[in-house]
Image (spheres, coloured by chain):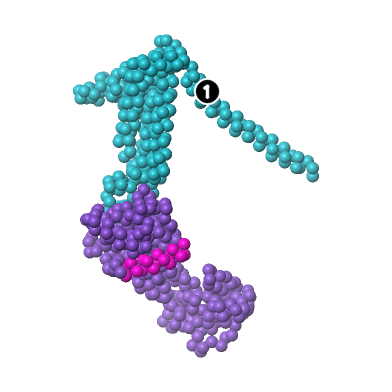
Chain colours: A purple, B cyan
């Protein structure tokens, strides 16, 4: 549905370099990356709001490269809602319909259906200033869909919402996507949003695409140490010699002989125990606790293993057992299958 | 140990007292400086003098002309100045600072110079002036000339106010409007303009208020027909202060009335938004 080929542009110090992307019809695609990586620039380029120097954009089989935004049939939803403050909820929703050949009667009926589906019917006559954050974002979504767009572009649609509203809107988005067979390109840096909504995703960094693929593949099999770190694989070990990852002080573990580059491991896949009796096929490394911290409801420890620091998620049982004071000796265990190879040359600055 | 708190107290309290005295005194003085001459002027003419002045056809004609020409200048600023204010608010281009300085120039240059400059351009000795004359447009001694002068001196106030107004409308609203199918023109008229309407109204107030008070430039371009400030000046030079005061009072009241009316309008506009 969206095909971006070789998109390049320069905006001051920032440059998009040869960005290519393919979003299939009916697909929910997540474009992820850290702040300043160029996610929104890609989105606004697809919407036609930014002038680029090179590349082509096709939407629904049509070359829209030279078309102005209003002729691309894409609807854009920003993080800050961008509702028209001088119009009511209903007026906001029907705003664009006249430009898409939708008759007023049909437009009104469809707008009311959308508002009803998003639980906004009772708010039709209100102005945006009298809505909550979640309601505003629902109205923005209804407004985007009311034009029957080929593609919906979402710029971090959930990031400004309270957790409760965020869950509600995430469910609403998922339902709408399935029921209306929408093609959605969503920019996000939130893993939960990406994992729960998208089937495929891309990671962008400094204006360059790092990886494009199935969402599970990106989170499980990152192709660069940057993507590995970005998706939360905090443990990256260099393959020091064929078949071996040495961590220093005589500590290390075996890897396949053919492995070159680095091995990445999610903190959730590392088991922390005071007892080295782990199953025979597990890799078991001696370590000393450096710190224990919590992020929300999850607990993590950083343990020094050789010269490396390994981050591991702590489960309730491990926390209850105690013995995790700084300096305490522990064993870190993981299965070889959880190690993911990040090949050499996949990350220039790695 | 005792000297320290005493010094601290002196250093802390005394300058504070002086500061407060300075603030209060200067506020009172400035307000008096503005209000006292106006109040004294308003209170000077007798009721008979005021009634006689209000029945004076020349006075009514000149006040009417002042209002009409100022209103026309502010409408011209609305029609012709709005696009420029929008371009300045939204676009970055080479020479933008020069354009902005050019717009501010009418505020800086002496007002009689404005009159001289317009006459130089539109006078009969200039090709442009001859074209205007051939088209039947006469600047010298005409309402057209007065309006042109008032438009010239009031334009910076309108453009700067409206430019700020456009800058306060988030670009993202325009982006969303475009993505929803509205072209640049529809986006401007359906989104940007309504959200900027209060600034435009305030800009018109400022432009009109500035135009209503203009004397120096008008007197060069058109002594006749007489606008109210010129009439007041003529009566002052010909007959003295007491004869010009009733005209001054009318001018003050008209200015205040217009200011009040438009302020109320702009306030209700804000409440609607």
Q: Is residue B212 visible?
A: yes
Residue stretch rendered in magenta on the structure: A162-178
Q: Quadrant of the C terminus of chain B?
A: top left
Q: Quadrant of the N terminus of chain B?
A: top right
**Residue B101, position as x, y percentages in the image:** 39, 34
- Farthest residue, direction left: B134
The quadrant in which residue B5 appears is: top right
Q: Residue at x 32, y 32 (%)?
A: B75
**Residue A108, position as x, y percentages in the image:** 27, 57
**Residue B37, position as x, y percentages in the image:** 50, 21
Q: Is residue A243 left or right of residue B223?
A: right
In magenta segment, residue A175: yes
Q: Where is mark 1, residue-wise?
A: B36
Q: Subunit of mark 1?
A: B
Q: Is residue A336 left or right of residue B55?
A: right
Q: Secondary structure at mark 1?
A: helix
Q: Is residue A348 visible?
A: no
The quadrant in which residue A62 appears is: bottom left
Q: Residue at x 49, y 23 (%)?
A: B38
Q: Residue at x 56, y 31 (%)?
A: B27
Residue A184, above or below A235:
above
Q: Is residue B85 left or right of residue A300?
A: left
């Amino acid at each position: 549905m969206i095909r971006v080929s070789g998109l390049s542009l320069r905006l001051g110090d920032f440059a998009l370099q040869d960005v290519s992307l393919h979003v299939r019809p009916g697909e929910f695609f997540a474009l992820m990356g850290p702040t300043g990586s160029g996610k929104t620039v890609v989105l606004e380029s697809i919407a036609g709001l930014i002038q680029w120097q090179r590349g082509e954009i096709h939407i629904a089989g049509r070359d829209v490269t030279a078309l102005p935004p209003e002729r691309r049939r894409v609807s854009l939803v920003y993080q800050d809602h961008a509702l028209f403050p001088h119009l009511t909820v209903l007026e906001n929703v029907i705003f664009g319909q006249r430009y898409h050949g939708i008759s007023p009667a049909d437009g009104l009926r469809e707008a009311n259906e959308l508002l009803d589906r998003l639980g906004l019917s009772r708010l039709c006559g209100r102005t945006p200033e009298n809505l909550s954050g979640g309601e505003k974002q629902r109205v923005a979504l209804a407004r985007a869909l009311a034009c029957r767009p080929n593609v919906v572009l979402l710029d971090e649609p959930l990031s400004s919402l309270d957790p409760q509203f965020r869950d509600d809107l995430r469910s609403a988005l998922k339902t709408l996507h399935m029921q209306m067979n929408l093609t959605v390109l969503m920019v996000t840096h939130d893993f939960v949003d990406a994992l729960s909504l998208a089937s495929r995703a891309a990671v962008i960094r400094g204006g360059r695409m790092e990886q494009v693929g199935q969402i599970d593949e990106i989170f499980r099999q990152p192709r660069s140490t940057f993507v590995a770190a970005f998706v939360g694989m905090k443990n990256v070990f260099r393959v020091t010699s064929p078949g071996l990852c040495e961590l220093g002080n005589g500590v290390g573990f075996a890897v396949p002989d053919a492995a070159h580059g680095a091995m990445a491991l999610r903190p959730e896949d590392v088991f922390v125990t005071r007892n080295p009796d782990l199953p025979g096929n597990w890799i078991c490394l001696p370590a000393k606790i450096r710190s224990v911290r919590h992020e929300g409801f999850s607990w993590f420890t950083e343990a020094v293993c050789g010269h490396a620091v390994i981050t591991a998620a702590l489960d309730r049982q491990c926390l209850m057992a105690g013995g995790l004071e700084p300096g305490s000796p522990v064993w870190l265990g993981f299965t070889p299958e959880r190690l993911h190879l990040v090949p050499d040359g996949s990350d220039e600055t790695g | 140990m005792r000297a320290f708190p005493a010094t601290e107290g002196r250093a802390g309290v005394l300058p504070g007292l002086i500061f407060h005295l300075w603030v209060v005194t200067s506020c009172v003085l400035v307000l008096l400086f503005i209000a006292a001459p106006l109040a004294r002027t308003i209170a000077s003419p007798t009721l008979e003098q005021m009634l006689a002045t209000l029945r004076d056809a020349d006075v009514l004609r000149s006040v009417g002309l002042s209002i009409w020409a100022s209103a026309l200048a502010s409408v011209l600023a609305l029609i012709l100045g709005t696009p420029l204010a929008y371009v300045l608010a939204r676009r970055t281009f080479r020479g933008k600072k020069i354009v902005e300085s050019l717009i501010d120039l009418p505020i800086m240059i002496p007002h009689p110079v404005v009159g001289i400059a317009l006459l130089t351009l539109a006078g009969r000795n200039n090709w442009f002036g001859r074209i205007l004359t051939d088209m039947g447009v006469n600047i010298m001694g005409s309402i057209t000339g007065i309006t042109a002068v008032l438009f010239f001196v009031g334009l910076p106030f309108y453009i700067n106010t409206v430019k700020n107004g456009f800058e306060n409308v988030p670009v993202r609203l325009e982006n969303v409007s475009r993505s929803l199918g509205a072209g640049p023109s529809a986006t401007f008229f359906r989104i940007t303009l309504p959200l900027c309407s209060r600034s435009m109204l305030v800009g018109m107030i400022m432009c009109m208020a500035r135009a209503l008070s203009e004397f120096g430039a008008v007197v060069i371009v058109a002594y006749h027909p007489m606008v109210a400030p010129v009439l007041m000046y003529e009566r002052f030079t010909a007959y003295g202060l007491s004869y010009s005061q009733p005209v001054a009072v009318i001018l003050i009241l008209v200015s205040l009335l217009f200011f009040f009316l438009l302020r109320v309008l702009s306030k209700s506009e804000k409440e609607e938004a």
